[in-house]
Amino acid sequence: MSSKMEQERWSDEILDAMRTKGDPIADDTVATILESDGLEGLRELLGQLQRNDVPEPDALPDGVKAYFDRTEILPAWADPELMERGARVFRTNGLLATMVLFAGSLPAAYAAKRSVQVLALSRRLQSDVKRRIVEMAQLVLDVVAEGGMGKGGYAIRTIQKVRLIHGAIRHYIQYPTSPLAFEWDRQWGTPINQEDLAGTLMTFCAAVLQGLAKYDVHIEPDNAEAYVHLWNVVGYVLGVSEQLLPRDVADAYRLHDRVMVRNHAPSEAGRLLTAALVEFLEQEIPGKALDGLAASNIRYLVGDRVADMLGVEPRHFTDRLISLERTIWGWTHDVQELSPRIRQLMGKMTYELLCSIERHEIGGERTKLRIPAGMMDHPPAGPGKPHWIWQLWPFRLFRDWWVARLLRAVAALPDSSS
């Protein structure tokens, strides 16, 4: 009986209905703007939201200010202690978790034929790649920062901004005079619908936990439940229906797997995104010996069936390196719990990863990320002599030639999360 109820919870009937639903609060806000200012007013709002990292509601129209006031309230069931414990899961495993997010979660999302059409229609397969990777990275960093979801944290404002942008894109695609309205296939459902939102949420949540486990990094059950709780609160603020928020880790896995299975199908948009992802990584990895490493990790994380849909071919040499990667990641996770030096090393590498995003220019301006101190363990205090361990030539080579370049490539992957 219990198994039957679990299957019915994410049935086709329920999820099909969710494909017809948007986000009433964000949609009503956008409708108010359209009514008063028309499509030009909506475009102006989108530009203002994208130009301002964390928008100040007082500087926005009254209707938009009311939206920010209404959606900043956390649900009554939100537990600050659980949220902080969940955030530590990502901060502690920041290096691998970020790699899993970009090399596993994103390709799996690209394989969702219906939801990826929003990216295709908004012409973001070829443009704004850097902007969107920075936006997604900042969302995750804000959420997992210590106190990020509390008062004084940046996460709530960042999520509210993304939610309103979703509403604007929904309306723009369906607006009668919009050129995109003629290209949208009703069989795809409502643009950025509730099932798509839940699927995106699970790429940050269930897919990360599953990906960590694939590299032999197993999170303690209580901490994994806390991680799901954190992203449930994020989903609530993002406008995901509470009906689609998983009850626990097992429920999150079922929801993620169900949404992916229902929506995975070959598509030109998915193949283009994935090809760009693989090509970029292989260009950034020094030399030719490790060409194929990106494809091998993608195939390992998403599985052969999905990889074939995306046109990711097997790379036999680098495929053999996956078992070595698993050993290294599993060993590192276990040892850093006991060794401050290993923890400091991982903190330094995580810092290199996040700082690499800042080296990119967007619209002629250098980006600036808010990097949580907890992602670095011992962040650099400023100019000075590096720790002695970094003076050893193997570590210098590993850091400067391999880590910095490879992680810069991972950090610059395109995103379809919103």
Image (spheres, helix red, strand yellow):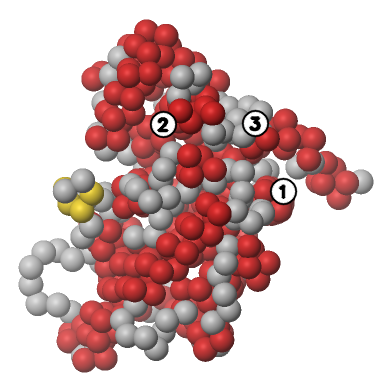
Q: Residue 147 occupies which quadrant of the picture?
A: top left
The secondary element bearing badge 3 is classed as helix
Residue at figure coordinates x 72%, y 30% from the top left: 17
Where in the figure is residue 87, as x and y percent of width and height?
45, 52
Residue 170 in percent (x, y) is at: 50, 28
In-front residue for pair 295/339: 295
How packed mark 1 is, by other alpha carbons closer than 10 Å (few <14, some 14-19, many 20 or more), is some
Whether residue 149 is visible, yes or no, is no
From the image, state whether disc 2 or disc 3 is nearer to you: 3
Residue beneath the point at 47% across and 57% down: 273
Judge from the rendering whether residue 302 lies leftward or rightward of residue 321; answer left or right: right
The kind of secondary structure element at disc 2 is: helix
Residue type of the residue flagged with mark 1: Arg
Q: Is residue 88 above or below residue 383?
A: above
Which percent across, then down, holds residue 297? 52, 73
Tell me which amino acid carries mark 3. Arg
Task: Write down the residue under mark 2.
Answer: 165
Marks counted in the figure total: 3
> Label 2, label 1: how many angstroms apart (C-alpha)?
26 Å
Residue found at the far right of this picture:
1
Is residue 283 placed above or below 177 in the rendered structure? below
Q: Gap between marks 3 and 1, in whole Å?
A: 17 Å
Tell me the residue that label 1 is attached to: 262
> Which class describes the residues within 10 Å of circle 3: few (<14), some (14-19), or many (20+)?
few
Which residue matches tag 3? 186
**Residue found at the far bottom of this picture:** 393
Q: Earlier along the polypeptide chain: callout 3 or callout 1?
A: 3
